[in-house]
Amino acid sequence: MDIDVEGIIQCIRQGNENGVQTQLQEFNKEYAQCFFFDTEERDRRKKRKLEEFRQNKVRDYTDSDSDCDEYDQQDRGVILRQSLGVVLVRFIRTGVKCRLLRVALRTLRILSRDQKVLSPLVTDTALLTLAKLAGLTTTDAGDEANESDSEFYDNIISTLAETRVFHSRTDGDDADIETSDPIDECLAYDDDAKSDVSNANSGELDSISWVGSHRTSINEMQRGGTHNKGLERGRRDRRESKMIGNEEEEEEEGEEAQRKEAMKVLCNVVYNSTWAQERFSALRLMCGLTERLSSGVSCSSPSSVQFYELRLLFLITALRSELSTQLQQEGGASILTTSLENCLEVRWKDQYECELDPAGPPISLEASQCAIEILKILFNITYSIHRQDPSEDDAALYRHLVAILRTCLMRKCLLTDDTDELQGHSVNLLTALPLQCLDVLLMVPPQPNSEQCQGVNMDCVHTLLIFMERRLESGDKVKEKLTPILNLLTESCRSHKETRHYIRKHILPPLKDVSHRPEEGSTVKSRLIRLMTHLDTDVKHCAADLIFVLCKENVGRFVKYTGYGNAAGLLATRGLLGGGSRTPVSDAQYSSDSDSDTEEYRQMKGRINPVTGRVEVEQPDPMEGMTEEEKEEEAKRLIMLFNKLSRDNIIQPMGVDAEGKLVPMAGLRENSLEEGKSGSEHDGEADEGQKD
């Protein structure tokens, strides 16, 4: 079904509100699931042309991915949608009725998904208009346009008429060459008409952009750029897709429904346009957004708009670092912590202990989604403070936040996916907070049925372990989903010996079976050791660091559990190939090493291959039966082969220097010679001294 966009504009011009509402609703219904206008429009026209071609031609139509016959359709579609955007921005400023306003805003939301037609929506007038409707500002958008309504609509209609004439002319040109081969037709169009379309439309696009003095030129928009990420094809709002109902929902009435739609448009525009992000900062809309959240904290029942306010705040803090810093400096962490507390309806049992009712209801869908957005924003504004020493007030705030994060980890959501996502973002935020504040996770007194280690409650640590195991099993987006929990567990083990003992008991139990390689099997230890040779450097270092810390950063114990082949990467990075006991950069204080060898391990220890970490099957001696002369000849032959490989730069012999790092053997020989020469000189000086 083709929507008559020009008809919508004519209805708006004539003031026919019933007609406008009806046609906009048809537009919204048709394009509700459309996220890539050009692609989807091209597919529709291609199918239609294919059917027409098959009806009118004898020979078969050869389908092609060539887009050369679609440029005029695409450009005209862009101009129509841009025109509709320009008109709707002006229309919603005229004080239209609430229901019609909501329908018009929904149309703008659909248009805002298309990066090619964003220009009418990223002007200061449009942004301020949307911000006012969303409740972010009381500032009226200045009436930049000096032209009257009649002049405004005359310009729009005139431009569309010119586009239609041009489109008809190119259609006529196509008809003249219709009998030619389809491939030749494409080539002819590409060589001749394409440049005309480009030239003609460049002027038309600019004229659309400049209808009235309140629009921004296409060139100006390109200078600002569009955000380089793209929405997934057909992806709906994840929150709404879970709700019962459909796109026409939301039969909410009044100001709240209007604010929600305006907020959705702002989210799309800010996400898709760097220019809009810059103007959002320049127009100081962050202040209004923060005030909205602050006022929402004091409300007994959260507004349905809150999720979209949080989503917009997340987008703007993720995409504009100066706004993230601004929010942090203006007390954003405190506001968001209170919002998170209210969202989860936290009840306090002690200063840093929240009540947890295992039989209580799960976190609702809306509450879990709002909590996830809050956690993402908090990460954006705190990720840089991890290694800093917080002030006394900040430390108290972060400890309060960690106590709430413990609740996020321990409680269940209505949907399993939401539980996993809430825990994931809680872990991300914990990795960003100052390390000294994380002891709150262990402050809850142990209960009779709780996990314990040395009298300390390990329920939260146990939950983190289960979470890590789930991420290991899924194997999806390993770097993004697994490195945060590995880092968090590593730092926790360094800081708290009870945590280290508990996790080591679950991940590195005493060795008994040494008949298999350490990386073989389905245990957590085996999976982590396999990650130590992962292609991604961050992943393999995170996995190796965790096991190394569980081994109290003892090289011998580390090699014992992983095998030298798996351990070599971390040892080379830390300069521990020489077998040093611990890395000098670690501040961790470990207790004295205890003998954890099992009887089974002691019996097999002498037969374990240190490189593979297992007992190898005995192999026959390859030099059995050879005389000493034959062995010597074989050794010389091997030396010659290695020398040839080295001279041809196929291999490079390496050794370990005094600092425990790998260096070329040539460098080692030079250092040895220099040391020997220096030693000889000192000996000579000493002898002369004795003679004197």
Image: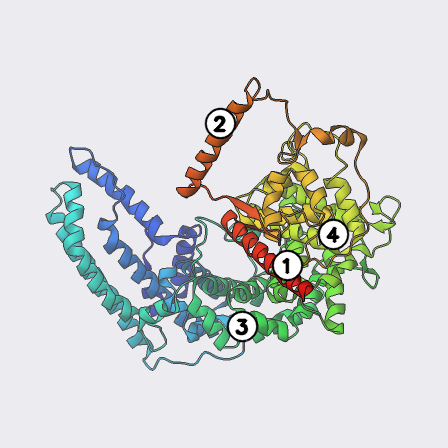
SS for tag 1? helix
- Compare marks 2 and 4 and give the one earlier in the sequence: 4
Visible in this render: residue 216? yes
Amino acid type, label 1: Asp
Question: Which residue appears at 14% of the width and 40% of the height?
Answer: 181
Of circles 4 and 3, the one toward us is 4
Which residue carries the number 4 mark? 493
Task: Measure the alpha-carbon separation of dots 4 and 3.
Answer: 34 Å
Amino acid type, label 2: Glu
Of circles 3 and 2, the one toward us is 2
User: Is the residue under label 3 in contact with that under label 4 (CB below 8 Å)?
Assistant: no
Q: Which mark is residue 683?
A: 1
Q: Which mark is residue 322?
A: 3
User: Is the residue under label 1 in contact with that under label 2 (CB below 8 Å)?
Assistant: no
In the rendered image, which quarter contains the C terminus? Answer: bottom right
Amino acid type, label 3: Glu
User: Is the residue under label 1 in contact with that under label 3 (CB below 8 Å)?
Assistant: no
Q: Residues within 10 Å of mark 2 (few under 14, many from 20)?
A: few
- Compare marks 4 and 3 and give the one earlier in the sequence: 3
Along the horizontal axis of the image, is 370 left or right of 258? right
Of circles 2 and 4, the one toward us is 2
Which residue carries the number 2 mark? 633
Task: Measure the alpha-carbon separation of dots 3 and 2.
Answer: 71 Å
Along the horizontal axis of the image, is 286 left or right of 146? right
